[in-house]
Image (cartoon, coloured by chain):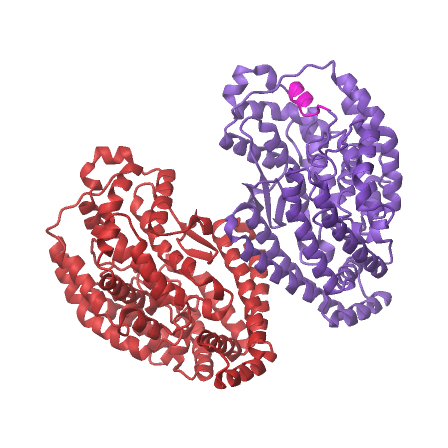
Chain colours: A red, B purple
Amino acid sequence: MSFSQLESQFRRIAHLEHVAAILSWDEAVMMPEAAGHARADAMSALGVVVHEHLTAPQLNDWLAEAEHEAGAGKLEATQSANLREMKRLVRRASALPSKLVEAASRAQLRCEQAWRKQRAKNDWEGFAPLLAEVVKLKREAAGALGQALNVRPYDALLDEFEPYGSSKDIDQWFGDLREFLPGLIDRVIEHQSKQTFEAPKGPFARAAQEALGRQLMEVVGFDMQRGRLDVSHHPFCGGVPTDVRVTTRYDETDFSSGLLGVLHETGHAKYEQGRPLDWIDQPVGQARGMSIHEGNSLLQEMQISRGREFLRFAAQHIAKAFPEAASAQPGAFTADNLARLFTRVQRGKIRVGADEVTYPCHVLLRYDLERDLIGGKLEVSDIPDAWDAGMKELLNISTAGDYRDGCMQDVHWPSGAFGYFPTYTLGAMTAAQLYAAAVRAQPSIPNDIAQGNFSAINAWLKESIWSKASSLTTGELMEQATGKPLDPTDFKRHLEHRYLEEV
Amino acid sequence: MSFSQLESQFRRIAHLEHVAAILSWDEAVMMPEAAGHARADAMSALGVVVHEHLTAPQLNDWLAEAEHEAGAGKLEATQSANLREMKRLVRRASALPSKLVEAASRAQLRCEQAWRKQRAKNDWEGFAPLLAEVVKLKREAAGALGQALNVRPYDALLDEFEPYGSSKDIDQWFGDLREFLPGLIDRVIEHQSKQTFEAPKGPFARAAQEALGRQLMEVVGFDMQRGRLDVSHHPFCGGVPTDVRVTTRYDETDFSSGLLGVLHETGHAKYEQGRPLDWIDQPVGQARGMSIHEGNSLLQEMQISRGREFLRFAAQHIAKAFPEAASAQPGAFTADNLARLFTRVQRGKIRVGADEVTYPCHVLLRYDLERDLIGGKLEVSDIPDAWDAGMKELLNISTAGDYRDGCMQDVHWPSGAFGYFPTYTLGAMTAAQLYAAAVRAQPSIPNDIAQGNFSAINAWLKESIWSKASSLTTGELMEQATGKPLDPTDFKRHLEHRYLEEV
């Protein structure tokens, strides 16, 4: 009885979040800029209504009674998992005094708005006090959330993006990668210095890029009856499982950024479309967390779409999409050339422009700093030196005095999203481990992909990951799907194989 | 104090309705069809939340106290008007038992879904019992609402679309038109039988139609920084004042339907964009009602855009938009020819295809029948005969046995929208009266329009109508704007002038 009351409360919350998801897409894709203020008010009112539903006084009684029902064996496994997720959401929503939430929102908004201008001017001195205010309030929130969830303060922030995630695990995995990556990068750059490749020359008409993107989205398994492809400033995957909204942007001088953007977001989209419709409006039916989400997108983009098997299939369609360019430069549109082009490795200061091999170094650095910032072992004023030291150690690059393309390059910290960064590399590890397990289970998969046949890989992902939604924790999910807990072994093996062994 | 509590409650309601407005646009313009069920659930949850906010128990106390504050002279005029509108909304929301609301929704949904198939099959016998159920529940709702608002049952339904509207007034105005129209139609058809005109031949490329539509929207005063133009199955104007979403559809064999659709909806859009931003999230800041809204769209479409002054300006741009067609048929793209083309009068069975002169006959008939259906003077089984009699009297057309293009042609009754039909013709009367008053106040307006200059007419509308939002009743608004209550005189004069006197 209590459990069904909880279910209907959370059903309504899911419906309101459906509304919010479509509105967010609209804001990024459709809304005229001048409508921003009024829209922010409307979205914030909707957010308050959702929060009121998550903190309704009767929820605690219902949760307590449902715990009792669960203890008496009256709930099925999925219901128990649903209860676990409900508790997590209610605890998170109730842990923070609304004054702190408001103060943090204000500080973050102020810091993010200032950052947009200060970054362009390399103005660390102006930025630091605003970021310090964000960090101060975030430490306070992390403390309160940590108490409510009974975890360390940083882990309580991580939990927003990676439920039940632990910095202890991450320390260990990232420590392993820290040992491995700098040497690998040296060897890969040396190895690639002997490769030749040819960059396709445009222009690549936007309509042709879009048609190609749609075609390949459908090939890899996106259901166009339950979603759309549009354009936004930054590519993203939004919407809801019955209506998944993928976006990308097009560069007429380089088709690869738009196309790989589409394929990356389609990895997210397939996970969303594959979630079990029966539980879609309950917490247990939601996507598991960012590492599994990013695992799906990187599996699609990195493991598959930048790989030779897929490109053996896709090269012909890419060439057909751009007939003039392809006939002018036939050598540029071969699978081998595209594979070399899509896997070039180069050290650089900027995370978002980084390749598959150097990207984790950027994440390792940010994770170390944000964990210590929240933990009180590092202050905002220490960031520039720590950043420079980390970049030297990991990528052999000096960023001294360059805040713009150094510690001020990302929006995450000014906007208060501490705990997000590690999920990028957890996602890369997850992608490698899932793909290796899928191929072990179905050895035909690479060959199928070379034929443009995604049925086996999609069936494996649906069975092992998508259909499970949040019924298991990330740890349990990975263990059931791959036979072992998450670790960096498959990711490291993938990098060595692709970047050193493949011809 | 109570009044400010009311204001914040209604501010939140306005924010939630902002969300609903954008979602409705998305559903019509962007959403893949397969997402419809889940979206309906989400929208219905949002509707329930809004309804809960409108029927919150504390509202009655706040309203009573605010009445007291108003009585003690503590409220300004706009605040008092806001209080009047709040009371109306709360009374409407609270008047109906939720069981009746649910039963009516179910009956309407069932009837509307069946109607889509039954209409195609001319199946009156199958349709009648479903419509009878809708009417039965609607009579019940009209009775309860009428009691709460202290008006006649039909007027309580009318009030949803035309707040404070009265069937007594409508009876009188429509009685006048019933005397006037059949004879006028005879004379106009006789008059036009001597005219020659040339229909432009396509194809008219969709992109060119869209560019022309955008260009003329901006000419007539639509602010593209605060809105969009897109495509939907039926043209509409949605969104919110800071972000007005206009849609149309394009026929490549006939540019006029898309273009006049854009201009009609732009009339609605200018009203929305012109509402006072200071009150935008309060009931007093909402659009006044359907007759004023339709008055704005028909003023833009009928009074202005199908008229010779505007076409003197627009003809050159229309010809430029379709250079091949225009050079093949120069005579088809003159202002005079377009004016004749856009004002052809023909008797027909179908309301939505009707011209400016015959359209009100369709409305008069529907109004008579629905008023008597709700009033209990007519039963559903009487509709076909009454329909046929009305069509013979008003338009000299027999519809006997043709339910499809007779009494089953419109979605309004199956969907329960009783009280809506009269607002189309109230809008036509309003448009004529407003335009006549604007030209009296600013005699340069027709000439300005012939130059593509809309500043005077838009300034007059903003001052007289848009900026007033719901601070006055429709009756007060018309009286202040035009110096007299609404009546059909200016509409009749406009029809005689345009259809009999203009060369």
- Magenta-highlighted residues: B335-345
Decide which of A209, B276 is in the foreground and name it: A209
Q: Residue furthest left?
A: A194
Quadrant of the rendering where the N terminus of chain B is positioned: bottom right
Decide which of B71, A128 is in the foreground and name it: B71
Q: Position of residue A88 (x, y in %)?
A: 47, 77
The answer to whether any part of residue B269 appears in the image is no
- Count of labels in the image: 0
The answer to whether any part of residue A5 appears in the image is yes
Horizontal relation, residue A335 to residue B56: left or right? left
**Up-down relation of residue A129 to residue A200 (above or below):** below
Q: Magenta stretch mostly in which secondary structure?
A: helix
Name which quarter of the figure residue B257 lies in. top right
**Up-down relation of residue A232 to residue A204 (above or below):** below
**Up-down relation of residue B489 to residue A338 (above or below):** above
Quadrant of the rendering where the C terminus of chain B is positioned: top right
Horizontal relation, residue A223 to residue A26: left or right? left
Q: Position of residue B323 (x, y in %)?
A: 51, 21
Q: Position of residue B315 (x, y in %)?
A: 61, 23
Residue A356: say if magenta: no
Name which quarter of the figure residue B283 lies in. bottom right
Q: Position of residue B418 (x, y in %)?
A: 76, 48
Look at 64% across and 65% down and name the residue there.
B49
Decide which of A60, B284 is in the foreground and name it: A60
